[in-house]
Image: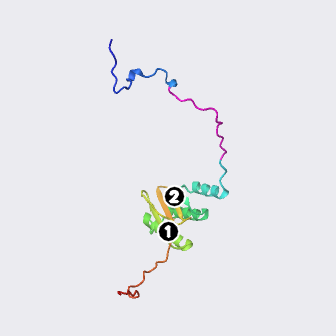
């Protein structure tokens, strides 16, 4: 009679239990099933923005911005992409136009990146970030904080006592 070999006391593949249900753990049925409430409906402003985005063929990817500002950015971007203005043909020119409009309307320190393929990691001011796409162009619009530059004290004013 031949004996099956085992390696370090482990069973061979042939020695598996025939009934796998013996190995499975039984679930505890003492807990009741968790019932989830349906999510609340979105506010009407968000529905309006979603309808506008669908109408303009825009895909909103990520946003931390008031809805009115989002709507302005999306409408301006769509107009810039659709315009047959010979002065605005490149994505960098589209980005500059959108940046200048937001600088004029909402204060300085707006930045805009437009392109078909780009990566980014940005730090933005609260309520100043929007990432969306119009047709095949992606738009990243964000605002940074502007802090006044504090000059270090002049070396001429410092008096150092060497005593």
The residue shown at (47%, 55%) is: 136
**Residue located at (60% from left, 63% from top):** 66
Whether 146 is among the magenta residues is: no
Which residue is farthest front?
Answer: 163
Dot 2 crowding, Cα within 10 Å, few <14, some 14–19, many 20+: many
Give the label on residue 90, or none: none
The location of residue 161, given as percent across then percent down, is 37, 87
Q: Single out the mark in the foreground, 2 or 1.
A: 1
Q: How far from the left and from the top, in percent, is residue 152?
A: 42, 80
- Report if residue 85 is visible in the image: no
Q: Which mark is residue 144?
A: 1
* Residue 120 appears left or right of 59: left
Left or right of 117? Residue 68 is right
Magenta part of the chain: 23-38
Dividing the picture into quadrants, the one containing residue 104 is bottom right
Instruction: State how many labels appear.
Output: 2
User: Splitting the image into 4 quarters, where does residue 116 fall?
Assistant: bottom left
What residue would you read off at disc 2?
132
Q: Is there a contact, CB below 8 Å, between mark 2 and mark 1?
A: no
Circle 1 packing at 10 Å, graded few (<14), some (14-19), many (20+), is some
Q: Is residue 26 left or right of residue 13?
A: right
Mark 2 or mark 1: whose residue is earlier in sequence: 2
Q: Nearer the viewer, residue 118 or 64?
A: 64
Secondary element at tag 1: loop
Q: Position of residue 96 (x, y in %)?
A: 46, 69
Q: Residue furthest top?
A: 1
Relative to 97, residue 6 above or below: above
> Which element is circle 2 on?
strand
Q: Is residue 95 left or right of residue 39?
A: left
Dominant secondary structure (helix, strand or loop) of the stretch shown in magenta: loop
Q: Is residue 37 magenta?
A: yes
Identify the residue shown where x is 44% and y is 63%. 91
């Amino acid at each position: 009679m031949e004996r099956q070999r085992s390696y370090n006391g482990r069973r061979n593949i042939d020695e598996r239990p025939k009934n796998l249900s013996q190995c499975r753990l039984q679930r505890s049925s003492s807990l009741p099933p968790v019932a989830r409430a349906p999510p609340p409906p979105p506010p009407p402003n968000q529905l309006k923005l979603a309808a506008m985005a669908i109408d303009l063929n825009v895909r909103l990817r990520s946003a931390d911005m008031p809805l009115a500002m989002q709507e302005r950015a999306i409408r301006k971007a769509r107009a810039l992409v659709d315009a047959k203005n010979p002065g605005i043909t490149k994505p960098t020119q589209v980005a500059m136009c959108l940046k200048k409009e937001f600088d004029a309307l909402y204060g300085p320190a707006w930045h805009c990146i437009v392109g078909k393929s780009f990566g980014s990691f940005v730090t933005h001011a609260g309520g100043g970030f929007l990432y969306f796409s119009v047709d095949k162009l992606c738009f990243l619009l964000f605002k940074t904080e502007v802090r006044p530059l504090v000059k270090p004290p002049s070396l001429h004013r410092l008096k150092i006592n060497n005593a």
